[in-house]
Image: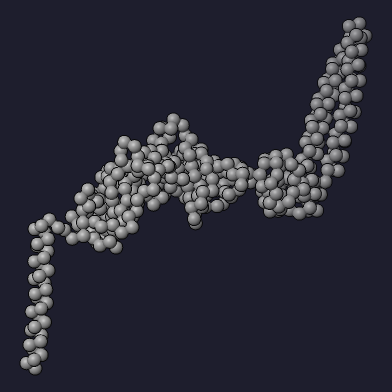
Amino acid sequence: MALRKALIAGAIVIVGGAILLRAYLHRADAAEGRVPTVTSAGAQTTLALSERLPLYLTGIGTVQALQSVTVKVRVDGQLEKVAFREGQTIAEGDLLAQIDAAPYQAALEAAMAQLAKDEASYQNGLVDLKRYENLIKQDSIAQQTYDTQVATVASLKAAVGVDQAQVSTARVNLAYTTIRSPLHGVVGIRLVDAGNIVHATDTTGLVVINQVDPISVIFTLPEEKFPAVTAAIAAAGRSVLAVEARARGDDTLLGKGELLLVNNSIDNTTGTFQLKANFKNPDHHLWPGQFVNIRVITSDAQVVTIPGAAVQRGGDGLYVFVVKPDDTAELRPVTLALQQDGKAVIATGLDAGTRVVVDGQFRLRPGMKVVENNPSEPSHDAAAGDGAAKKGPAS
């Protein structure tokens, strides 16, 4: 038992001595100006860059056809022919369907026959009226007879006018039996098969045609972004701002377009406002009903950027660790203009060319010596005049 107590006491003495020795060495280091260092496994750094970047606002939008038309029949009859294939791209004026035209051809011929008959009667009435004019001058007929002939000619003339209108109507109805595409676009699913009797009052129509090139996207932005949009429009001197549509899953670029309009009110139930952009879409990467991510390019500015991973959040706000010329760490408060594409755009706190820590910050304290592990250096040339590295605009 005595031996055990002696061993425990000896261990306590050894541990205590080690602690005292470590404290002494630490004080000695401090007295000689040496500071603790981050090990070679602890830090990676890079330079803050001066870049010309397209700055943008992001939203979520829904693709819509530039125009969408439900093709309906305008006369009753049997659908003799459907001339399109489902999913086919068609041009304006292409044949879509044919209704049995025989009844309407017969109606046109009857109207034309009636017109010819009434025109003959009208011409005969004019001849009689001319003869009565001569007779009335000779006082050979009663005034009433002459007046009756004038009224008869006027009635015949009106009948000819009615007949002409009937002929025009018959021609229009006959033309309606041939159904053509009102626009260039893609046809959807066939809604009626050939052989069915169709009516002008049918609500379903024959097919829906969507114009998909060009195509539109309706999207929303938070109302606090409204001033940024209007300022960008004012700076550009026009409402046409560049807009990008990207896939929701992998952010693939689907199309580049132009802002068409900012809607004329803010929705106070959602706190958002609507915008509309048009896109050329020859490869059909955008499709009606598709959800996409939208970027509205508000400016193309020279800015200071660092990797987003370099920015840390503390109790007093955002900060980064800066590597000073003597390779010691300094905690530097920063403010951000925005973050995009994995980059932080610095508003205040950093100049281009400043070295910042992008990995290993959790081991750092202000004043520590920074030893890098696999330093991340920009691969592009240093910027002339400001000592900052530059690279091209982000794609």
Q: Is residue 310 above or below residue 54?
A: below
Q: Is residue 123 left or right of residue 298?
A: right
**In the rendered image, which quarter contains the N terminus?**
bottom left
Q: Nearer the viewer, residue 345 or 203?
A: 345
Residue 232 horizontal/vertical position (percent): 41, 36
Q: Residue at x 85, y 34 (%)?
A: 111
Q: Quadrant of residue 280?
A: top right
Q: Nearer the viewer, residue 199 or 6?
A: 6
Q: Is residue 114 above or below residue 186?
A: above
Q: Residue at x 42, y 42 (%)?
A: 392
Q: Nearer the viewer, residue 136 or 8?
A: 8
Q: Residue furthest bottom?
A: 1
Q: Residue at x 89, y 6 (%)?
A: 137
Residue 63 horizontal/vertical position (percent): 55, 48
Residue 175 horizontal/vertical position (percent): 78, 38
Q: Is residue 209 visible?
A: no
